[in-house]
Image (cartoon, rainbow, N blue to C red):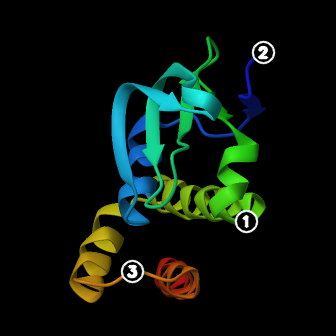
Amino acid sequence: MTHFSTLRTKSSDPDVLILTFIHLNLKVKIDHDIRGYNGQRTRCDVVCIPPKGDYDLGYSRNSDGSYDLIVDLWGLAKQYNQTTFINCINATYAVLIDLKRNGDLKQYLTDVAFYREGWYLEQEWIDKLAQVYRKKKEQ
């Protein structure tokens, strides 16, 4: 019996999905196995490797272009609040996809790279920077 759960997501842009993990200082692998309970593995298109623990998050592309999140929720919960962890990924993806649609993604990532060198970017900063770019766009 598998411990992996499959959760439908609204993610559909693989580049932004990968940027989301990089943006959150999480390791990313493409077309790789994720790790689950008792050594179980399953292949996913995009894999996020959290810094703690032995359980990964995988994203598998559907025929309609969206991605399913494949994860051992029990294993993830051993090291993280799973809801907070997944919501952080979803919120960051949403900000980055919005910036991409508005043509501001490149400038945003350039500014973030300048400000965050050597430290993690907190969710509060992501929100503040997104607000700054939205205000610029409105002007």
- The structure residue drawn at horizontal position 55% and vertical position 55%, both measured from the top left corner, is 93
Q: Amino acid at mark 2?
A: Met
Q: Residues within 10 Å of mark 1 (few under 14, many from 20)?
A: few
Do the CB atoms of the residues marked 3 and 2 lie less than 8 Å apart?
A: no
Q: Residue 12's x, y, as percent?
A: 57, 34
- The structure residue drawn at horizontal position 48% and vertical position 84%, both measured from the top left corner, is 129
Q: Residue 50's x, y, as percent?
A: 48, 55
Q: CA distance from mark 3 to mark 1?
A: 18 Å
Q: Which disc is residue 1 wearing?
A: 2
- Give the residue at mark 1: 81
Q: Amino acid at mark 1?
A: Asn
Q: Amino acid at mark 3?
A: Tyr
Q: Which disc is residue 67 wearing?
A: none
Q: Nearer the viewer, residue 130 or 90?
A: 90
Examine the rendering and report whether any part of residue 10 can be seen.
yes
Q: Which disc is residue 120 wearing?
A: 3
